[in-house]
Every structure is written in structure tokens, then in C-alpha cells.
Image (tube, rainbow, N blue to C red):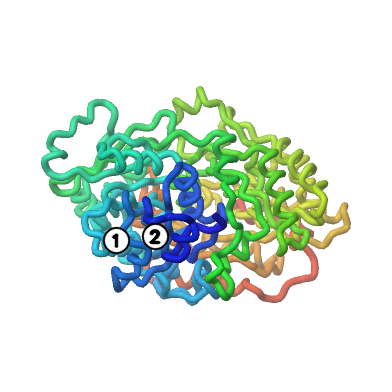
Amino acid sequence: MEFLPINAEEMKKAGYDELDILLITGDFYVDHPSFGVAVIGRWLTACGYRVGLIFQPDWKTPDSLRVMGRPRLGVGVTSGNLDSMVNLYTAGRRLRREDAYSENGVPGKRPPHALVVYAQLARQAFPRIPVVLGGLEASLRRVAHYDYWQDKIRPSVLVDSKADILCYGMGEKPMPEIFRRLERGESLAGIRGTAVLLGKQDAAAFNPGDRYLELPSYEEHLVNRDALMTATKMLEAEMNPFAGHGLLQRCGERLLVVEPPPEPLTSAELDRVHELGYAGRPHPSCKGRIPAYETIRDSVPAIRGCPGGCAFCGLVAHQGRQVMSRSPESILREITAMTKKPWFKGTVSDIGGAAGNIFGSETDREFCAKCRRSSCLFPHICPHYRCDGKKLLELLRKASRIPGVKHLYINSGIRLDLALRQPELFREIVSHHVSGHLKVAPEHLHPEVLKLMRKNPAEEFYRIQEIFEEESRRCGKEQYLVPLFISNFPGCTAEHMKTVDDFLSRHRWSLQQVQDYIPLPMTMGAAMYYCGKAPDGHPIPVNRGLAERRPQIRVLKKRRNGPRENRSPSSAPRPAGNHRKH
């Protein structure tokens, strides 16, 4: 079966007289492991279920969900690869002009708060059907959270959606268990990586023992801004799958029960997930282009998780902090198969994930089982985190020798803190695996803002510039660093932003990537933005309205696509101490 069926005709071709599970997504259907709904659909199919998929349904009519009949067991709902509000709205709370996950980038194919809308639509289409929430939006909104676009605290998405259960994280372990229990008529309680909302009677009877910790209630969030900071700290401390507690949160007379995270997949399990026979392209009903697919078409997903724990990023809340790497053999098999695709032109655009130099990182599980850190890398790299880059270096050399591979690039971006500890790997990447531009993310250059972001000192960025320019010059290539800077992060003042502006001005640097800060639900940055406080409790300035945010936005936008010298900006002299003056 090349694609999961999307209508009655394709069901018939698949040999299905009915579906066991119907999946609904706000993204166009791309059968590729970089798209979450494809992964879960393929995984459930491999577990023996008959799975169908409806993408971007008309949310104004339940008939849009009835094209394959009523599923036997239940409906799984995701808004897609992004939170639907991030997908629809800019940092200025204005509608975006393009949706990278829709055909030809056409916006408006999904509703705001898509999880709630799709779940309610499923119940209208199929009364009393079990509904399961999943995907990134479910992960980020599994507890009471701050919604930046509505500028208010919202309860767990389970409250408004009235779904039966929420699956957070990537879902390969809990999702089959959920549907096994639904098939057997068993309770959905106690499945790791899930959350359920208990009614009044069940909430009163629930005995947490010492397995659960209680978050501030939804009602407390409404009257006390600091409750969000308290809850965020607790959430971060309990995200460890080896030692995390379950969490409880009261919402009126109901009780939200969040189970601990599931253990990360082994390398063999991750290999299996990525070798499920994906078509590797959009569904044939697509007559145009899917921008997000074009970005990753010739890439190879290699890892899960991120050790960084940056305050602005929601990845840890979804994929976790533990790094999971596929085996080199699995990746080499995928690249070999890719070379035989009709669209392949000889270039592997990326091997990566959260960053291009995380692959092969390892930790000491015995020590991790006792850890409560929010980051493996900040404020200093954990001594139990091993990241010498040798496994990735060997993989790149083997992959480059595969017949048909002309170029092999790393485009996921490079973590600066790791690159400095991987000198041989970094020089090899610069010499052989840069497509002309290498993405890095210093995010800022002022030490106070970097500390709030949980990013390491700007000196690491300056040092990487030097090495990058030195190696580019040695191999005779004109190459450029592509840095990402963020404006209006909580605690960032105009004077802090001037540090970035002065640096860019001295180097006459034209930026290709700019980002105005968006407080993602369930991140430390969102708690700081909402509370106006740093994690240690001291007050920080926050730019809230567009009028307050505009000056910092202009600092970066005036540098975007402007005049630029015909050389790598890192060849200019290193700033002489200006970055330290504050």
C-alpha cells in the first residue's frame, strides 16, 4: 500500500471494508517520516490496524469526515506538524500569507485551535466515538497554558475538545496501547505519555499516592500569574522519562491526570519507524507543490530529541531531551534507496534533526535517572553527555561514498556549543558538507539575554566564525554563515538589542533569517513573557504590544536582504570587546 487510504475508492483498493482507525490532520498528506501523521498512520498499520486518513477537512460540516464511514475503534486528531495558531498567525497576531504545509502554500486550510475544532467535528460525525488527541499542539497544550494569540490562560486542550485521551510526544509507544485497550473495552488510565480528564466522581476517588505531583490548578492560573511559572518549572523537572512523576491539575471539579513520559525509542525501534515503506512524497491528489515537503524531500531524518532545552523552544516538550539516533546502517540504506528515486538529482540535502551535529550523542542512563536539569548543555555541558561527533563523522564519510551521491549537506543547523567540542567533525562539515550557507543559531549576543534564553556565551559564536572562515579559506570555498537572531525575547531591552545591531553593522551583514519572538505554550519563555519574571523570580522587562515590539523587529528587518560584501562576514575582524561592555 503506497499511501494510506483517503476515500472510499482507496479503501477498496486497500482491501478494507471498514476502517479501524480514522486519522485527521490539518496538514496536506505527505507520506514521509518528517510528517507526524504519516508516521503514526504507518505505525498503527504495522500493528495490524486498518487506518485511513482525512487531511484538511472542511471543518464547517461533519460530512467531510464521513467519506470512509464510521471507524470501528476511534478517531485520532492532530492539527499537523505545527501548533495551529503558529501556523495561522505571525508574532504580530496577523494572518500569515502562506501555509507551508498546504498545497501551493495556500493559507486558511485549517481552523484556529484545530485540535478542538476537529475533535468536536469528529463527535458530530460519529456520535460517541472515542477521540484521541496527538501531535505537537496536543503536547504543548496538555495542561493549562498561556495562549499568546488570545492573550489569556486556557485549560488543557482536553477540556474544550472533550476528547477521551491525549497522547503527548511522538506517540509510537502509547498510540497502539490506546487502541488495543479501546478494542478490548479496557480503561485508558495509566498509559505513559498520555493525559486524561477525570469527571467529578472519578476525580474524588482518585488516589495519587506518591506517583504524582500536583500542579497549580487552572483556577489558580487565572488569579495568580506566578502560577504559570511554578507549573512550568514542575513540568520541566518531570519530563525525564526515567525519573519523572505523573502530574495532576484540577480544573473545577475535574482532575487532569498526566502520566510520565514514555521511555525513548531504542535505535532499533527508531530504525523500524523510519523503514515502514513510506512513499516519500505527497499524496497524488496534490497537483501543485507543498513548500514544507520541498524543504525536506531529499533529506534524511536521523535523530529524535534535543539536549538544549532552550527557553523559547517547544521541541523538548514534544520530543524530549534524550537524544535518540538511528543506526548508521538504517541511514545508509535510506540514502541508497533515495538514489533510485526518479526525482533524486544526486544531492542529499540533510542528515539531521533538531541540529545537524547531535547525531550519535550519548548519555549515562544511570545518571540520567536521577537528573532534574532542564538542559543537558546549559549553563554548562553535563559531564555525562558524550558528544565528540565521531559517529557522525564516520557516517558522513560512508554516505558520501554511496554510488549516485554527488553532494551530502548538513542543513539542520549546527549547535555552537557542541561544534567547539567536535573540532574534527566541524572542519569536515565546513570542508565537504556546506551547500554554500551554514545555519547557526546564536539567537542573541548580549550575555543577559543569552542567559535568559538558556544559550551559552556569544564568544562561542565568535570562535565558530573564526574556524568557519579559516576552514573555508583553506579549502578554497566562498561560504557563508547564516545566523538566526531573535528580537523581543522577554528581558531583552533596546540596549541589549543594540549589541546585535552594532555587531551586524560592523560586519555589514545581511540576514537571511529573522524571527520575532513568539511565546509557545508550555515553554519557559512563555512563562517569562506572561509573568514578567525570570525563572529565579526577579522582574524583567517584556515588550507586549506591536507598538512596543516594533523597534526591535526593525533592528533585524533592516538587516534582511540588504547590501552585503562578497565574502563571508566572519572574515572581518572579530569585535574587540564590545559584546562584553554591558
Query: Quadrant of the image for the N terminus?
Result: bottom right
In front of the other: 398 or 574: 398
Q: What element carries label 1?
A: helix
User: Does residue 418 appear to the left or right of 60 in the view shown?
Assistant: right
Name the spot of residue 372 as percent of width and height, x first: 43, 32
In front of the other: 282 or 550: 282
Q: Residue at image x 40%, y 63%?
A: 84
Name the spot of residue 12 as percent of width and height, x first: 45, 61
- Name the disc covering residue 24, or none: 2
Looking at the rendered structure, the kind of residue marked 1 is Ala
In front of the other: 430 or 464: 430
* Residue matched to label 1: 122
The local crowd at label 1, few if under 14, some if 14 to 19, many if 20 or more residues have their Cα within 10 Å, is many
The residues bearing labels 2 and 1 have C-alpha atoms spaced at a distance of 9 Å
Q: Residue at image x 57%, y 47%?
A: 276
Q: In which quarter of the image is residue 232?
A: top left
Residue 300, placed above or below residue 112: above
Q: Is residue 453 visible?
A: no
Looking at the rendered structure, the kind of residue marked 2 is Ile
Name the spot of residue 22 as percent of width and height, x first: 38, 56
Residue 481, placed above or below residue 73: below
Residue 339, placed above or below residue 48: below
Q: In which quarter of the image is residue 207?
A: top left
Q: Are circles 2 and 1 on residues that touch, CB within 8 Å?
A: yes
Name the spot of residue 345 as percent of width and height, x first: 76, 63
Q: Residue at image x 38%, y 54%?
A: 19
Q: Can residue 8 be seen in this view?
A: yes
Q: Residue at image x 56%, y 52%?
A: 33
Precedes in sequence: disc 2 or disc 1 = 2
Q: Is mark 2 on a helix, strand or loop?
A: strand
The local crowd at label 2, few if under 14, some if 14 to 19, many if 20 or more residues have their Cα within 10 Å, is many
